[in-house]
Image (spheres, coloured by chain):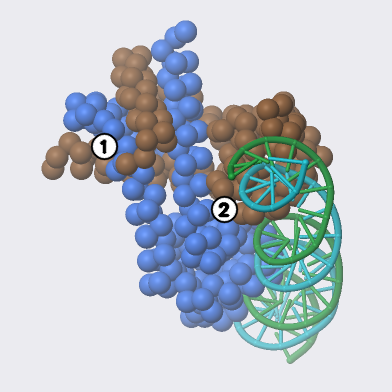
Chain colours: A brown, B blue, C cyan, D green
DNA sequence: GGATATAGTTAAGCCCGCTTAACTAAAAAG
DNA sequence: CTTTTTAGTTAAGCGGGCTTAACTATATCC
């Protein structure tokens, strides 16, 4: 078995475990907060992409800009988003998470990732350092992939 | 900053990227197949729990059994699920994925794993080996945590 | 400057998921 | 055997997300 195949298999295994732990928890948290999955997806997009225009979000989420406009509107009213005019193009809007929006995501993460800290306790300092290095490599690769898809 | 804090932060960062990516891909795939997110969640539950009754799913998904009944009905008609009578309790139903349902999930996984493979191409053989080792450490820690929670 | 393209909003209408409530059928309890 | 509980279905109705289509406002092109 080549390193590449082993890498792929191990990562898939890890990814499955994590996926298994995560999805259900998010759904519960979002619902408990009184929000919908489409709203949550929009928040997640803005969590990862800081500042977006409407048509930008429309493309990424595969829905019409009209739908985005309406979703954003509700989330602005709910206080999770801020919508400002783009100073360089007065047609465009800059949508981003409000403080409350960031808190909502952060709190969801906190709730879900207690196990990360628990896992740390199962590892020696050396092991943690080793994993931290490896994760940095993966983060770099993930970013490369984002900017320069295969 | 201690190793432990750094470990925790890096892992969370990774988990953020992965979550976002994964959800986005699933959402696209599900939508392209003409299915809804609630339908997808139901399929995922059955992917993990093989065989479920209606009220079982109702509890796990936090919706009424009436809602589940209706969801299941549509997915049976679509050919993704099978619904049979429980031989030991003629009131109950045994719901499970059909062959087509399992294929649908499997194909979605393949699509998602494409991302993992793409990432592999951004990494050298040495880096992959290093990450593989680190992931094994994490898998072990995750298993420890499962059997002996903090 | 006038035509065209682009960014976003608004409104009408459809579909779907979800809830409540009323119902059937079978099991469990007494 | 009767009563009660449990599993699931069905139907009515509400609300929300999404689309299309019409519209405003700004930017770009010739």
- Left or right? Give the position of A59 relative to A86: left
- Left or right? Give the position of A56 relative to A131: right
Residue B48, numbered circle: none
Residue linked to disc 1: B121
Q: Looking at the picture, tell me which residue is in the foreground, A97 or B2.
A: A97
Q: Residue at x 44, y 26 (%)?
A: B11
Q: Count the marks: how many?
A: 2
Q: Is residue A122 above or below residue B24?
A: above
- How far across and how far down the image is residue B64, in percent? 69, 63
- Left or right? Give the position of D20 relative to C13: left
Residue linked to disc 2: A62
**Parent chain of label 1:** B
Q: Residue at x 68, y 28 (%)?
A: A88
Q: Residue at x 44, y 30 (%)?
A: B14
In the rendered structure, are the residues bearing label 2 and label 1 in contact, judged by CB atoms less than 8 Å apart? no
Query: Between marks 2 and 1, how big is the CA–CA gap?
Result: 28 Å
Q: Looking at the picture, tell me which residue is in the foreground, B53 or A59.
A: A59
**Parent chain of label 2:** A
Of all residues shown, which one is farthest toward the top?
B1
- How far across and how far down the image is residue A4, in percent? 20, 38
Q: Secondary structure at mark 1?
A: loop
- How far across and how far down the image is residue D29, in percent? 59, 42
Q: Residue at x 42, y 20 (%)?
A: B7
Q: Is residue A81 above or below residue D5?
A: above
Q: Is residue A90 above or below residue A20?
A: above
**Label 1, residues with CA under 10 Å away: few <14, some 14-19, many ≥20:** some
- How far across and how far down the image is residue B82, in percent? 47, 76
Q: Quadrant of residue A55?
A: top right
Residue B12 visible? The answer is yes
């Amino acid at each position: 078995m080549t390193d590449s195949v082993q890498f792929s298999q191990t990562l898939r295994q890890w990814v499955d475990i994590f996926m298994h732990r995560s999805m259900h928890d998010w759904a519960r948290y979002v619902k408990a907060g009184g929000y919908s999955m489409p709203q949550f997806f929009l928040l997640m997009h803005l969590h990862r992409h800081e500042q977006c225009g409407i048509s930008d979000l429309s493309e990424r989420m595969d829905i019409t800009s009209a739908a985005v406009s309406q979703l954003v509107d509700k989330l602005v009213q709910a206080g999770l988003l801020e919508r400002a005019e783009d100073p360089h193009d007065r047609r465009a809007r800059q949508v981003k998470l409000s403080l409350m929006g960031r808190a909502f995501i952060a709190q969801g993460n906190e709730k879900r990732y207690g196990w990360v800290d628990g896992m740390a306790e199962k590892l020696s300092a050396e092991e943690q350092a080793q994993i931290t290095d490896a994760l940095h490599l993966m983060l770099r690769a993930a970013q490369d992939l984002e900017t320069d898809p295969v």
